[in-house]
């Protein structure tokens, strides 16, 4: 990891360009609160780029491109007690990702409980734009512009994933009639 944040509160990572890595650019652990990743560029990574757990953490206004695997994983909270994480992914752009991991690996993976994903743009997904599991997520006002063989919001793979709200998302991808 280029930056690992564990057992911390009130940390801001802002305006940094991360590039050329084989591990996570940023790894925010379960025991964190109020960590903000703002206005960063993440590019040219062979694997997955950013993972965020913990409570009340934010990734906002970041650009992800030329990522070998999944650009963003965001979770947190407690599914057993349905305690929302309060984590937020907002106004980010995802392009040219899944270069190495071509299938079953969306731009964003939501997990845990109570994550909000809004106002993001995903383009050029080779397969999935989004994967999710968990509870009480809010997925709204996101746009998928092009690419991918699957709809923007596929069904969760987990039968225990309930009470996730998806509203006003736009899938601008023309589907083939094949």
Image (cartoon, grey):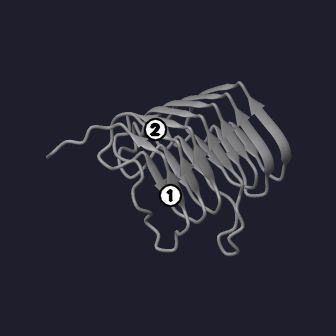
The residue beneath circle 1 is 132
* Left or right: where 100 falls relative to 136: left
Picture coordinates of residue 86, whole percent (x, y): 72, 54
Packing grade of label 2 (10 A; few <14, some 14-19, many >=20) is many
Observer able to see residue 29: yes
Nearer the observer, disc 2 or disc 1? Answer: 2
The residue beneath circle 2 is 143
* Left or right: where 7 falls relative to 25: right
Observer able to see residue 1: no
The N terminus is located in which quarter? top right
Q: Earlier in the sequence, mark 2 or mark 1?
A: 1
Secondary structure of the residue carrying tag 2 is strand
Which quarter of the figure has residue 134?
A: bottom right
Where 71 falls versus 163 (above or below)? above
Where 170 falls versus 17 (above or below)? below
Q: Residue at x 53, y 40 (%)?
A: 71
Q: Residue at x 63, y 37 (%)?
A: 25
Picture coordinates of residue 29, whole percent (x, y): 72, 53
* Left or right: where 2 falls relative to 137: right
Picture coordinates of residue 163, whole percent (x, y): 56, 67
* Left or right: where 155 falls relative to 18: left
Q: Residue at x 52, y 52 (%)?
A: 109
Real-space Cα distance between discs 2 and 1?
16 Å
């Amino acid at each position: 990891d280029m930056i690992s944040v564990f057992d911390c509160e009130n940390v801001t990572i802002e305006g940094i360009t991360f590039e050329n890595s084989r591990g996570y650019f940023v790894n925010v652990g379960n025991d964190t609160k109020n960590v903000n990743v703002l206005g960063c560029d993440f590019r040219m990574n062979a694997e997955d780029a950013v993972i965020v757990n913990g409570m009340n953490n934010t990734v906002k206004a970041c650009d992800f491109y030329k990522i070998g695997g999944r650009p963003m994983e965001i979770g947190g909270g407690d599914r057993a007690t349905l305690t929302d994480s309060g984590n937020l992914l907002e106004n980010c752009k995802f392009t040219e990702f899944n270069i190495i991991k071509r299938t079953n690996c969306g731009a964003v993976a939501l997990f845990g409980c109570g994550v909000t994903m809004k106002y993001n743009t995903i383009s050029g997904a080779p397969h999935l734009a989004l994967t999710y599991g968990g509870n009480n997520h809010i997925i709204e006002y996101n746009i998928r512009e092009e690419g991918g063989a699957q709809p923007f919001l596929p069904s969760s793979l987990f039968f225990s994933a309930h009470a996730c709200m998806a509203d006003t998302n736009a899938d601008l991808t023309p589907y083939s009639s094949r």
